Amino acid sequence: MNTIFWAGDSTVQTNNYATYPQTGIGQVFSLFLREGYQVENHAKNGRSTKSFLDEGRLAVIEQRLGEGDFLFIQFGHNDEKSEDPSRYTDPFSSFMENLEIYINTARKKGAFPVLITPVERRCFVDEGHLGPGAHGDYVEGMKRTARKCQVPLVDLYSASRRALEKAGEEGSRKWYMFFPAGSYEEHMEESTDNTHLRYEGAVKYASFIAEGLRNLGGIYREMLFEEPQAEAL
């Protein structure tokens, strides 16, 4: 059994009933995997590349990583928090340096690291157009690290921006924790959260990661089930 270990934040984490209907990308990614592959999701709410390291969460993954496994590395949201020195990283120095630690940890264990850019927030300026985005420098820092270390990268940030603009402000609400009061018995209050995902959004964005892996080919494509072909009329 090959295992995909996931290091990331709340957009990736596996949620429980206490945070329903919030759903993380890593929580649903097994929907796209062939038999013989599994996800071990270590992503945690509020973590950055720095705090994840400082709390020993990568060390736990390192103990469990084996040859032929995968380490998916997806950060950015909390690395941006300049007001919090326990989480903040500079996009073109400490963020990139931390990403290299994750990459080298995987490689030392014979595992395959994959960088995944952060999912975009619902940062609409009008119905059909997004603002400049919150993660640009961190996306670029991750891309530079991928080139430097020759690591595969899936650009979820760009894919999610395209999907958001296509769906529009109102149409994209169903993907995020953005809903009126009374929508859920478990979450009766209104939510205008433009960052965290509901099930539909988690599956949507997980499908973009799967598409990116298919495009990489080789061992990355092999982990995924083949997309069903449309039946001939």
Image (spheres, helix red, strand yellow):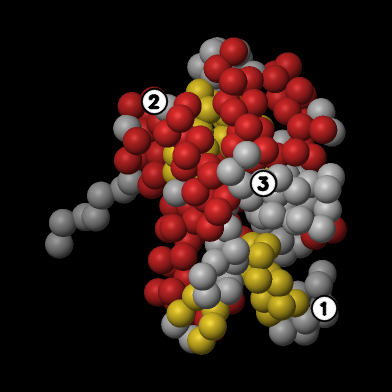
Q: Position of residue 88 (x, y in %)?
A: 75, 48
Q: Secondary structure at mark 1?
A: loop
* Three-letter code for the amino acid on which mark 3 is drawn: Asp
Q: Residue at x 42, y 34 (%)?
A: 147
Label 2 with label 3: CB-CB less than 8 Å? no
Among the two numbered marks 2 and 3 on one chain, the one whose residue lies closer to the N terminus: 3
Instruction: Give the Cα separation between the discs numbered 2 and 3.
Output: 32 Å
Q: Position of residue 32 (x, y in %)?
A: 47, 43
Tag 3: Cα neighbours inside 10 Å, few (<14), some, or many (≥20)? some
Q: Position of residue 5 (x, y in %)?
A: 62, 30
Horizontal side, residue 82 vs residue 93: left or right? right
Among the two numbered marks 3 and 1 on one chain, the one whose residue lies closer to the N terminus: 3
* Three-letter code for the amino acid on which mark 1 is drawn: Met
Above or below, 43 relative to 104: below
Q: Residue at x 65, y 71 (%)?
A: 194
Instruction: Give the Cα separation between the discs numbered 1 and 2.
Output: 44 Å
Tag 2: Cα neighbours inside 10 Å, few (<14), some, or many (≥20)? few
Q: Secondary structure at mark 3?
A: loop
Above or below, 84 relative to 53: below
Tell me the residue that label 3 is attached to: 90
Q: Position of residue 15 (x, y in %)?
A: 75, 51
Tell me the residue that label 1 is attached to: 188
* Three-letter code for the amino acid on which mark 2 is drawn: Ile
Tag 1: Cα neighbours inside 10 Å, few (<14), some, or many (≥20)? few
Q: Secondary structure at mark 2?
A: helix
Label 1 with label 2: CB-CB less than 8 Å? no
Tell me the residue that label 2 is attached to: 219
